[in-house]
Image (spheres, rainbow, N blue to C red):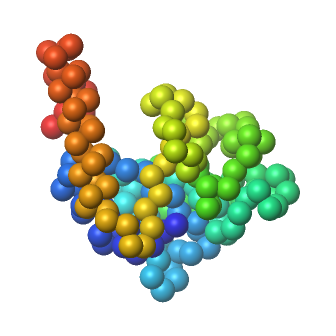
Amino acid sequence: DGNKSDLDVVCPMLLEAGLGASFFFATDLFDKTGYISGQDVQRIAATAGMEIGVHGTVHHRWTEHAPTRIRQEMLEARRIQANLSGWPITHIAPPYGAWSAALAAIARREGFRQFHTCNERPGPQAAYLQHRLCIRAGDDVAALLEQKSSRQSVLRARLRALYPAPLPNQR
């Protein structure tokens, strides 16, 4: 959503764990108390392994509004974030995980490469529909990161056994 803790707490924890992430921001929350600023968007986008994505201009359920309105909102939020970050914005995630196939299709037609949902089943890495981990107040972020890091380590070990050459993006 763009909570200030995304920058102050979560980014440093991800970097320490050697992980990257996509952050989805609702642009109407920029510069409000407890939320990130436009300058913070630039800092997150400039951090290696971090990516920003569209979460709308207004944080509301997209399924409760006309698709034409949501399309305009997708495009406006992408324009704002691209201007702030200096990067193309290619990922999108609807607020509250409220989505439909029609909204996913609109986003695809508008050039978004991935549509992140709160579905429990992650898709293949190259799939258009992607699972997103929704972190909420009270969640144990360190435990979530440890679990993800542990799964990543197992995958890397299996890949190393199959392909002894260095893996891309390996530190």
Q: Give how far across and how far down residue 85 sits, in percent.
A: 46, 57
Picture coordinates of residue 18 (x, y %)? 21, 48
Image point 51% across, 58% down: which residue? 24
Residue 57 higher or lower than 114, as above or below: below
Task: Name the quarter where the C terminus is drawn.
Answer: top left
* Residue that lies at the very extreme toward the bottom in this rendered image: 33
Question: Where residue 140 sits in the image (x, y, percent)?
Answer: 31, 65
- Left or right: residue 91 versus residue 64 is left
How many numbered markers are drawn?
Answer: 0
As drawn, is 126 to the left or to the right of 62?
A: left
Q: Is residue 95 visible?
A: yes
Nearer to me, 73 or 128: 128
- Which of the pair 141/51 is nearer the observer? 141
**Is 9 positioned to the left or the right of 87 in the image?**
left
Q: Residue at x 69, y 42 (%)?
A: 104
123 relative to 78, above or below: above
Q: Give left or right: position of 67 versus 140.
A: right
Q: Residue at x 39, y 56 (%)?
A: 45
Give the image location of residue 156, x and y in percent: 22, 29
Residue placed at 56% from the left, 75% from the top? 29
- Is residue 88 visible in the rendered structure shown here? no
